[in-house]
Amino acid sequence: MIADRISLVVIAVVVTLVVAFGYLRLGDRALALLPLAWNRRLLPWLFVAPAAAMLGLTLVFPAILTVVFSFFDAEGSAFVGFANYSETLSDSVTQIALRNTVMWVLLLPALAVLVGLTIAVLAERVAYGGLVKAALFLPIAISAVAAGVIWTFMYDYQPPIAEQTGTVNALITLIPGTDPVAWIINEATNNYALIAATLWTQAGFAMVIFAAALRSIPEELHEAARLDGASEWKLFRHVTFPALVPTVVVVATTMTVIALKAFDIVYVMTNGSYGTDVLSTVMYRELFTAKDNGVAGAVATILMVAVIPIMIFNVRQFRRGKES
Amino acid sequence: MTFRSTGIALIATSLFVAACSSSDSDTSEKREVEAPASAVDAAEKAAAEAADGKQLGGKVTMLGVLGGAELDAFESVVEPFEKATGVEVQYEGTRDFAAVLQTRVDGGNPPDVVATPAIGEMAGFAEQGKLVNLRDVVGDDVLDANFSKSLLETGSLDDEVFGIFNSVNLGGLIWYNPQVYDGPTDPQSWDELQEWARGKAGSDIAPWCVGLESGAASGWPAADFIDEILLRQAGPEFHQRWREGEEPWTSPEVKQAFETYGGMVEDDMVYGGTTTVLSTNFAKAANPMFTESPACYLHEQATFMGGIITDSFPNLKPGEDLDFFPAPDFNPEFPGVRSISGEIVGMINETPQSTALVKYLATREAGVLIASTGRWLSPNKNVDPSIYRDAFLKKASEVLADSEGTYSLGNALMPQTEVDAFWKAGLDYTKDPEDLDSILETIQQAR
C-alpha cells in the first residue's frame, strides 16, 4: 500500500522532470531553426508558457468560474443577474460579517506592524533578543486550527465561584474584585479576542521581516547620526523608520490579505456565533451548508474585488522599490 | 533571525509537539469494550454469510462522525467482519461531515459507505440519486425482520431505503447524582420537576447543569431538548407537520416549547448562569455534579451521556453515584412519548466489499455487538434487551419498551441549513430570551 504510493511519487517526479527537460530542449532546438529575430521574440514565451498554463488552470480559470457562478442560481442552471449580490448584501448576517471584516482589515495589519516592529527594534539591543524573537516566532509553526483550539483554552470561562481554567481569566481574576470575562461569547470582546489570537500566529512573521530589513540598514548611517548628536528616538524616527517604510508596506499588505482571508480561527473558536462572522465563514456556510453556488460565488467575488486594490498598491510599491 | 535562534525555535517546537503527543497517549486509555466471545463468534459467522462465504479481501472506505472512545467501540463491532472476510474497513471520522461528504461526492471520490446522525442531510443525497437503495442490497425480508416499520420509514425516500439505523440513543434523560439529589425521581409532570427546581434556584447548589458549546455545532443540546419538548408538548402529529415544513417556526406551539426550555436555563436556575451555559462544552457540562462539593442537581442529555460521564469519572458506580430518570410528560394529552436519535448507514459505491459490510451491519449479530459496547442501544428489534450489561442501557431499553410511541427528533431529519439555524437559535435564545420572536423569524427564513 505505502510502497505503491512511494513508487507512484517517484515515477511522477521522474516523468515530470523528463517531460520538462524534453519540452525545453526540443522547444529550444525548434526555435533555433527560426531566424534570429523570431527566435528572440518567441524564446521568452517558451519559458513562460508552462508556468502561465499552470496559473491559468489553477487560478485564473476557477476565479472566472466563480464570478460566473455568482450570476446564476443555486444549481448554476438559470441566470439571475445581480440577485445573489442583493440577497447577500441585504442579509443581516452578511452585514455583520462585512462590519467585522472591515474591523479585521483595520486592526490586524496595524497591530502586526506595531508589535513586529517594536519587538524587532528592541530585540536588536538586548543580549536575550534571540530568545524573545524565538518565542514570538514559534506560533508561526502552529496551524491556524491548532491555534484556534489553543486560544479556546486560553479564553476559557468558568463562573466566578469556580477555579478559572483559562489562562487569561486566571490572570485577570488575580486583580481583586475582577470577575472573569467570557471573551469569545461577550459581544463587546469577542471580535477583538479572535483578532488577538490571529495576531499571535502572525506577529512573528512581521517581526522576522522587520528584523531582516533592520540588518540591511548600513550601520554607518546610525554612527553618523549619533556623531551628530541624535537621540535614540530621533535616530529611529529620522533614520531607521524611513528606511523601513517599504517593509512596513509589505507587512501591512500581507496582513490585510490575511485579515480578508480570515477563516480557520473564527470557524474553530465561534463558527460565527454571537456576531463574529467574517465574509469567508459566510461563504463557507453558503457553499457547504446551504449548497448555494450562486450566493457563495457572490460572497467570494466581493472578497476578490476587495483584495484587488490592495494587490495593485502592493505591486506598485514593489516596482517603485525596484526602481530606486 | 540568527541561525542560533532558528535552532531554538525548532527545538522548542519539537518539544511542544512531543509534549502534545505524550499527553495524548496518557488520556487515550481505552474503556473496556468487551463483548462475550460467543457473540463475537456469532458475528464472524454472520459476516462470512454476508460475504457469501468468500474471502473478499480489499477494503471499504467509510465516512462518519465518530472519534476517540466511540470510534474504538464501533471498530470493535467491525472487527469480526474484517476477520471473517479479509476486508479492511477504513473509517474516516469528521465533525464536519456534511462539508467533507459534499466535497468528496462533487470531486468524484466519495466514500463507499457513510454513517451519520444527520438523516435529513442523507435524504438530500438520496434525492440527488447518490445513495444505493438498500432494499436491493440487504433484501426486504431481512430489513422487515430486523427493523421496525417506523425506523425503516425514517431512512426512506418514497419506497427506497437510503439508510438503516446502526445505533440508537434515547433522548430526554434527566441525569442526577443520587448522593446529592433529593427531589422527585418519578415526577408526574415537567411542571412538578421544575417546581422542585425553582425552590432550589439561587442556592449554593444550582438546580441544573447545562452546556451548549460544541465547536461548529454549538447549540445542538438546546435544539435537541426543545425538539423533544415540542414532540411531547404539542404532540407527535404537530411535530411531524412542523419538521416537514407545514407548521411555521413562529407558531405558538414552537414558541411555547422554546419558553419551556427557557425555564430551565434562566440565569439563577443553572450552574454559573447563562454565560457558563454558553461557554461550557456539552461533554463537560455534567462535571460540576460530581466534584467534591457538587454544584448542581440535574442534567438533561441522551443515553450516551452515561458513557461520557463515566469516561471522566471512572470511579462512579452506576445507580449509586449516577443515575437517570426519563424526562416526565410535558402534556398529559401525550403521555409516555419518547424521542430517539441515532446513526444511519448508507451506501454510495456498491462494491462486493461495501455490500458485505452493510449486510453485516444489518444482522442481528452485529446489533448484539453494538449493544455490548455499552454505548448505544441497538436498533435491531431481534436483539434481546437482556444482553445489555450496562446498567444505563438496560434501563433505557426498558423505558423504550414501555413507551407509548417512539419518534425521531425533528432536527435530525431537516435540511442542514435549517438545522444550523436551529442550533444557533438555541444559543441566541439562551443568551437573549426576550428576542424569541425575532429568533424564530430568523429560523423560519432559513427554511
Image (cartoon, coloured by chain):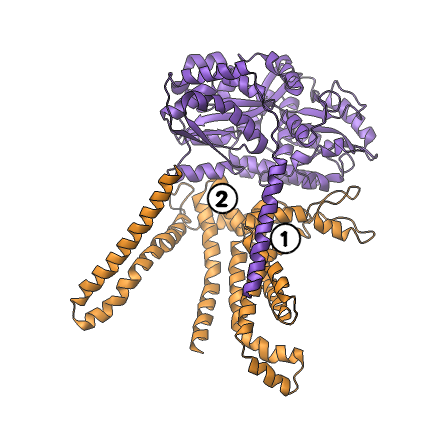
Chain colours: A orange, B purple
Give the vertical position of B24 relative to B410 (above or below): below
Q: Check chain identity for marks 1 and 2: say if they share one.
A: yes
The residue to which callout 2 is attached is A286
* Callout 1: chain: A
Tell me the kind of residue under disc 2. Answer: Glu
Above or below, comparing residue B331 to residue B309 in the picture = above
Residue A255, given in percent of the width and then of the height, sits at 54, 61
- Which image quadrant: the N terminus of chain A? top left
Q: Secondary structure at mark 1?
A: helix
Residue A102 visible: no
User: Foreground: B90 or A178?
Assistant: B90
* Residue situated in front as seen by the camera: B167 or B89: B89
Q: Which mark is residue B106?
A: none
Q: Residue at x 55, y 21 (%)?
A: B370
Q: Is residue B332 left or right of residue A63?
A: right
Residue A264, position as x, y percentages in the image:
54, 49
Residue located 54% across and 23% down the image: B167
Q: Chain of mark 2?
A: A
Q: Position of residue B345 (x, y in %)?
A: 47, 25
Q: Is residue B23 visible?
A: yes
> Which of B206/B380 is in front?
B380
Residue sticking out furthest to the bottom: A228
Q: Position of residue B64 (x, y in %)?
A: 50, 32
- Horizontal placement of A52 versus A212: left or right? left
Q: Earlier in the sequence, mark 1 or mark 2?
A: 1
Q: Secondary structure at mark 2?
A: helix
Q: Nearer the viewer, mark 1 or mark 2?
A: 1
Q: CA distance from mark 1 to mark 2?
A: 21 Å
Image quarter of residue A37: bottom left
What residue does disc 1 label?
A: A191
Q: Amino acid at mark 1?
A: Asn
Q: Is residue A300 above or below residue B242?
A: below
